[in-house]
Amino acid sequence: MSSEVANIATAESEAGPSNFSPKPTTEKQQQPRNSNMPRLTSEQLRRHLHYIASGSTVILKMPSGRTKAAEIMPGKQVSLGKFGSFKADDLIGMPYGFTYEIQPEIASASTSEEASKQNGKGAKKGGAGNSNAAAGGSLKLVINHTLNDLETEASETVETTATNEHINDDGSAQKLTYVDIQELKNKGISGREIIEQQLASSESFANRTVYSQAKYVARKEQKHLKLFTPLQPDFGNVCDFWFDKSPEKIRWIRKDALSQVLSFGSVRTGGRYLVVDGVSGLLVGSVLERLGGDGTVIAINDAESPPAFDIIPYFNFPAQVTKPVLKILNWAATEPDYAPVFSNQDISTVTSTTSENRSTKDKSRDRKRQANFREVDRVRSEYFAGDFDAVLIACHYDPMSILRRLKPHLGGSASVVVHSPYLQPLVEAHAKLRGDGEFINISVTEPWLRKYQVLPGRTHPEMTTSSTAGYILHAMRVFGDKQALEMRKEYFTSWEEEEKQAREALEEAKSEEHTDTQEESAADEEGRDTKRVKTDGTTEAETAAA
C-alpha cells in the first residue's frame, strides 16, 4: 500500500466522530415498526419513472454519449449549446427513453441567416450556433434502431475489396470547409443532409472498409445531429451522470458499486436504515428510491443545519417518498445526554419575560426553533428505539468510529456496509471487526465493471473504462450470548405478562357473563311472579262475579 493511501487513511481516522459507545437499548425501549405510513401506488411510482413531469430535473444524453442536466420548467427555453434549444413545454408529459431531434423553425432559420449576413458573422465560430440556440426549435420523435434492424443491415452489407491503406485523416480529402458547413446550418439544412453532402464530398470515403465507413458516419452523426434522449431518473443514471461530471463529489462510487452497497444492505420496502452519506445525497437518494415511500431512513450528518444533499433533486421524488421517510440527525444528537444550546425551557422563559418587548419576527423565530427542537426529539426517540435493518456508510470518516457509535442500535442480522475509494481504512476495519464476536461474514470486495460494444460482427470490450470504483466492506451483526439470553428472558417475561392479561380478561369476561346470567334469571323470576299475581287476581275477580 502506498504512503499516499496510508496518509489518507490516517486523515480519515482523525476526522471521525468520537468513540463514545452508548449503552445498548433494551427490548422495553424498542418501539414497534410503523407500517401505516402513506404509500404511493404502483401506478404513481411507474409514472414518476416513465413520464417527464413539470419542474423536474432531467438528464439528457447527447449523440456523443455525454450527458447534460436540464430543468424542465413551463414556458422556459432549454439550451443545449451548439445543438440548439427547444421549448420545455414540448417535453413535459413525454416518456423517458425516447430520442428527440431539434428541428429549427423555418422563420427562425431565415431570421438567423439574415442576421448573420448583416453582421458579417456567418463565418465566425459559434455565431450561427448562438443564433439558433436563441431562436429555439421544435422537437421531432426519432425511431431508435433495434437489434433486429442492426442484424438486418449487417446481413445486407456487402464486403468490398477496399482497405484503409492509403487513407490519411488530415482533412485534405474533405472538400466541404467549415465555412460551407456553417452556411448550410444557417439555411436551416438538417444534420442528415449535411452528413450526406459531407459523404458525397469526401474523396476517401469510397476507399474505406465497411466498418470504417460506419465509424466515419457515426462520428459525423455525433457532431451534426441535434439529438438527445431523456434518461430515467433512477439511481444508475444519476450515478453515471455524476461519475462522469464530478467523480470526487461522490467519492468515485460507480453505479455497479452503488448497486452492490444496496444489495449488501438488503435495502427493501418497509425497512429501517441508518445512512451516513458523504456523497452529496447519492446514497440517501438510492435508498429512498428502493423504499418507495414506505420505511424509515435516518441520515446522520456532522452539521448543525440539515445537509444540502444537492443530488437528491435529480431523482425527482414526490413529497410522499421523502417527507414521511427521510429524517435528519446530527452526530451530537446521537449522544444519550444531548441537550441543544437553547432548550425549550430557555425559549419559553425568555418569551414569557420579554413578550411585551419582542417583535413579531422574534416570536415567529422562537416558534420555529421550538418546532425544530420537537422534531429533533421525535427523530432521537426513533433512533434510540433501535432495531435498524442496516447501516450504510459512504463518507471520509473512520468506519470503526462510526460503527462503535451505531452498533447498539442495530437489530439482529443487520448488515453493515461501508464504501471507500481507498483500501487501507477498510482493511483496518476488517481486522478490528474480526476480533468482535458480534460480527460475522466479514469481507472486503472490489467491484469491477467492463462495458461492451454489442454490434453484429463487432462485439468487443470498449477500449477505455474506469479503473476502479472503490472498495466495499460488508459484515453482519449478531447478538452475543449475554445479550441473547437477556432478550430471551425479556421475551418470556413479556409473554407471561400477555398470557396473564389474557387469562384475567377471560376470567373477567366469564364473570360478566355469569353476572348477566344471574340478572336475566332474576328478571325471569320476577316476570313469572308478576304473571302469577295477575293470574291469581283474575281468578278471584271471576269467583266474586259468579
Image: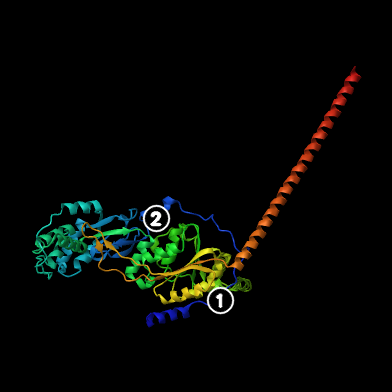
Q: Is the residue 116 above or below the residue 93 in the image?
A: below
Labelled pair 1, 2 in contact (Cβ < 8 Å)? no
Label 1 crowd (10 A; few <14 / some 14-19 / many >=20): few
Q: CA distance from mark 1 to mark 2?
A: 42 Å
Label 2 crowd (10 A; few <14 / some 14-19 / many >=20): some
The mark nearer the N terminus, 1 or 2, is: 1
Q: Quadrant of residue 409?
A: bottom right
Q: Quadrant of residue 421?
A: bottom left
Q: Position of residue 293 (x, y in %)?
A: 47, 57
Q: Is residue 387 visible?
A: yes
Q: Position of residue 537 (x, y in %)?
A: 87, 26
**In percent of the image, x 21 and y 53: which residue is there?**
151
Instruction: Residue under label 2, please give it.
Output: 48
Q: Is residue 494 toward the left or the right of residue 178 in the image?
A: right
Callout 1 secondary element: loop
Callout 2 secondary element: helix
Q: Is the residue 7 above or below the residue 223 in the image?
A: below
Quadrant in the picture for the C terminus: top right
Q: Position of residue 388 (x, y in %)?
A: 53, 64
The amino acid sitting under disc 2 is His
